[in-house]
Image (cartoon, helix red, strand yellow):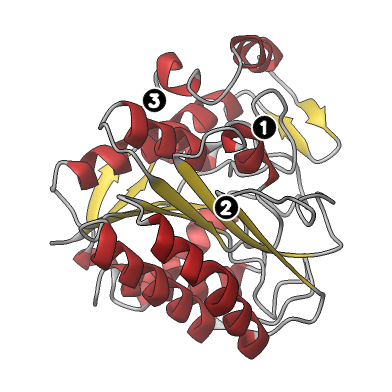
Amino acid sequence: MHTAYITHPECLKHDMGSGHPESPLRLRAIDDRLHAAHLFDYLIHREAPLVHRSQLLRVHDAAYIDSIEAASPYQGFHALDPDTGMNPHSLDAAYHAAGGAVMAVDLVMRGEVASAFVACRPPGHHATRSQAMGFCIFNNVAVAAAHALEAHGLERVAIVDFDVHHGNGTEDIFRNDPRAMLCSTFQHPFYPHCGADTASGHIVNVPLPAGTAGAAYRAAFSAQIMPRLEAFRPQMLFFSAGFDAHREDDMAQFGLVEADYVWITEQTMGVAARHAKGRIVSVLEGGYDLSALGRSAAVHIKTLADL
């Protein structure tokens, strides 16, 4: 069984301006590293389709979707918030990013692949039901998880969010849905300045201080996330795969390295093997130092693909 690699050329056209860290170069960095590491040809390549409105409506308000469509500029740039904007290609890129996450679920659930990595942008885990923020427009991993629940009839899914920023949008969307467990490790205090006080049976937030590196991170993950995941027995696992906790990424102040991303992937794959028939979908979130992003995503994908 292989791993699918899902992307779309339109995701390279979403551009929020010169110097913006969430740039098209992020996808090129991952692609380049997969070629350099001789991994590219071992993956099953698929082009992300457009998401259906009905799939977005599972996690976003209709009025919010309408507002995003209305904000899409014919030319120039439209700011959704101080960090997040749209050019004329951004709406289609966001549709393909969410659609790629849905495709990943379908491929894995049909048994066509064992796992999938969705290399699309804009990212999604900060997008709430009704608000774009933090470079995110639609919450791609939430769209995917809801699709697994509603279209494929699963009863329990889990999202492991290892981005350095809290997955506040995913928490907002699934706060009242115990079928979806969110496990989010994140630097705190830090953007988006929430999540540390959440107490829930299915929301597992692990705030960690600036300077957290591999040993401390692994200890927290092992103690606070692994037992909860095991007890939940998810039938499908998702990654919100942000690589901005890398020590070379100056977006934040964590100290993870490639070996830590391998370890996180392996631990979660173990849960998937025991409870979810090995089913895993990984959706790209952050990661802004291009070299660190490329290397980290490549080892994550290599581990997913058992190469």
For the N terminus, the quadrant is: bottom left
**Badge 1: how crowded within 10 Å, few (<14), some, or many (20+)?**
many
Residue 33: tell me if it is visible. Answer: no
Residue at the (62%, 62%) spot, across then down: 287
Observer-side mark, 2 or 3, equals 2
Residue at the (58%, 64%) spot, across then down: 162
Q: Is residue 301 left or right of residue 159?
A: left
Amino acid type at circle 2 is Glu
Q: Which residue is mark 1?
A: 128
Measured Cα–Cα span from mark 3 to mark 1? 20 Å
Mark before the other along the chain sequence, 2 or 3: 3
x, y percentage for residue 118? 40, 49
x, y percentage for residue 73? 69, 17
State whether residue 88 is above or below residue 83.
above
Amino acid type at circle 3 is Leu
Measured Cα–Cα span from mark 1 to mark 2? 15 Å
Observer-side mark, 1 or 2, equals 1
Amino acid type at circle 1 is Thr
In front of the other: 32 or 102: 102
Mark before the other along the chain sequence, 1 or 2: 1
Residue at the (68%, 12%) spot, across then down: 67
Q: Which residue is mark 2?
A: 285
Observer-side mark, 3 or 1, equals 1
Q: Which mark is residue 50?
A: 3
Q: Which mark is residue 282?
A: none
